Image (cartoon, rainbow, N blue to C red):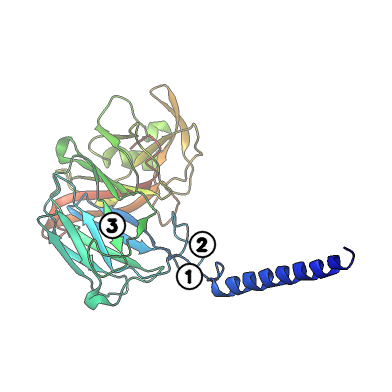
């Protein structure tokens, strides 16, 4: 027995050695998990501007570029983007004068499909795709009869074909437009990448007061003469989901019979004090406390976005007559756009 034990131990060691060699061979032959090709990242964001003048622009950005990433992107895409499709909402069909280009001027192939009711956009010649960090501007005209909240569902692919291969994931909310038609030919349009509905009402017995009697001096006297024809109140619906980016609320109305320049008109703006700080106002001041309908608000005359952060006036001009938007949607219509957060109820 004492002689056999060493022999058995040696045989066992040889068996273990053979097993170890077989395992090593299997590991060498099997593909390495750490060396596997990582899955490609395909992300994009989209936002909407315009709409109130009958022309809209959807900006599509392939996620990537220098740090930090664009809002809502969680990673840089690893492939280029070659095709985009935008569904035109019911009530805003058909889209006309469709075009697409990069900020550097590269023209993409864009068309409106009257069967699918979509704007289809392809990279030119199958090349010149949208690399990570690059953007594409897609513009079209739509009827100006919009009333309510409309979503411009946007999709994208890495391939140079609609509904092709390499589908991208949208990381922002879908581009959304809310518009309402009020009295005196006045319209209100809100664009952005928010989700849900926004309620727009015109008129009302209570509202912000930016008159000289309320302490706004000469600017208050100017506001009393040159202001919106009808007060606008904007309130998020119960299904509203706020995005990270500022939104644009655009008022349009006919120039009063007495004439004047669009730049003379001032915007009196109010936000509830709860959850907010006083915003910067025209002339370098700060919004003042004011109670509206029994609720404490901050009220002030908005400054230009050149001089102040949101809320602020981002556009202000007078349309000149028939023709292409934004200048030609009708003679002598005042156009004033406010950059703001639609997640907050406000009046102006």
- Compare residues 126 and 194 and report the one nearer the observer: 126
Nearer-N-terminus badge (2/1): 1
Q: Quadrant of the C terminus?
A: top left
- Circles 3 and 1, Cβ within 8 Å, touching? The answer is no
Q: Position of residue 5 (x, y in %)?
A: 85, 65
Q: Distance between the residues labelled 2 and 3?
A: 24 Å
- Compare residues 303 and 8 and report the one nearer the observer: 8
**In this figure, which residue is indicated by the disc labeled 3?**
155
Answer with the quarter of the image where residue 4 lies: bottom right
Q: Residue furthest front?
A: 1
Q: Residues within 10 Å of mark 2 (few under 14, many from 20)?
A: few
Mark 1 secondary-structure assignment: loop
Please name which of the two marks, 2 or 3, marks the residue nearer to the observer: 3
**In this figure, which residue is indicated by the disc labeled 1?**
37
Q: In which quarter of the image is the N terminus?
A: bottom right
Q: Where is residue 130 in the image (x, y as percent from the top left)?
A: 33, 70
Could you tell me which residue is drawn at 18 percent across and 36 percent down? 182
Name above or below for residue 152 compared with residue 236.
Answer: below
Name above or below for residue 138 compared with residue 196.
Answer: below
**In this figure, which residue is indicated by the disc labeled 2?**
68
Could you tell me which residue is drawn at 47 percent across and 43 percent down? 279
Q: Residues within 10 Å of mark 3 (few under 14, many from 20)?
A: many
Asked whether the viewer can see residue 77, the reply is: yes
Left or right: where does residue 109 sit relative to residue 298? left
């Amino acid at each position: 027995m004492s002689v056999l034990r060493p022999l058995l131990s040696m045989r066992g060691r040889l068996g273990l050695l053979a097993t170890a060699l077989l395992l090593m061979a299997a590991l060498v032959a099997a593909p390495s998990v750490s060396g596997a090709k990582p899955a490609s990242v395909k992300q994009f964001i989209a936002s909407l501007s315009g709409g109130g003048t009958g022309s809209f622009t959807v900006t599509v950005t392939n996620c990537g570029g220098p740090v930090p990433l664009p809002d809502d992107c969680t990673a840089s895409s690893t492939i280029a983007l070659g095709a985009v499709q935008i569904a035109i909402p019911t009530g805003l069909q058909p889209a006309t004068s469709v075009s697409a280009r990069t900020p550097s001027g590269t023209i993409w192939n864009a068309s409106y499909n009257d069967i699918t009711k979509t704007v289809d956009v392809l990279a030119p010649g199958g090349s010149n795709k949208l690399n990570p960090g690059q953007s594409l501007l897609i513009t079209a005209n739509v009827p100006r009869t919009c009333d309510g909240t409309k979503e411009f569902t946007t999709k994208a692919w890495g391939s140079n074909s609609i509904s092709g291969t390499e589908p991208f994931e949208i990381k922002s909310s879908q581009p959304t437009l809310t518009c309402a038609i009020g009295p005196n030919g006045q319209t209100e349009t809100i664009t952005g990448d928010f989700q849900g509905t926004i309620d727009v009402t015109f008129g009302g017995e209570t509202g912000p007061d930016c008159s000289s009697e309320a302490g706004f001096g000469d600017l208050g006297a100017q506001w009393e003469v040159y202001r919106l024809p009808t007060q606008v109140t904007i309130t998020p619906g119960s299904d509203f989901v706020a995005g990270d980016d500022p939104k644009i609320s655009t008022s349009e109305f006919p120039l009063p019979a007495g004439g004047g320049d669009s730049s003379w008109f001032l915007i009196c703006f109010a936000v509830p004090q709860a959850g907010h700080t006083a915003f910067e106002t025209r002339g370098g001041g700060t919004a003042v406390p004011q109670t509206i309908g029994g609720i404490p608000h901050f009220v002030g005359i908005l400054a230009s976005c050149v001089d102040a952060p949101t809320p602020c006036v981002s556009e202000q001009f007078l349309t000149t007559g028939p023709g292409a938007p934004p200048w030609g949607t009708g003679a002598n219509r005042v156009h004033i756009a406010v950059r703001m957060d639609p997640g907050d109820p406000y009046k102006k």
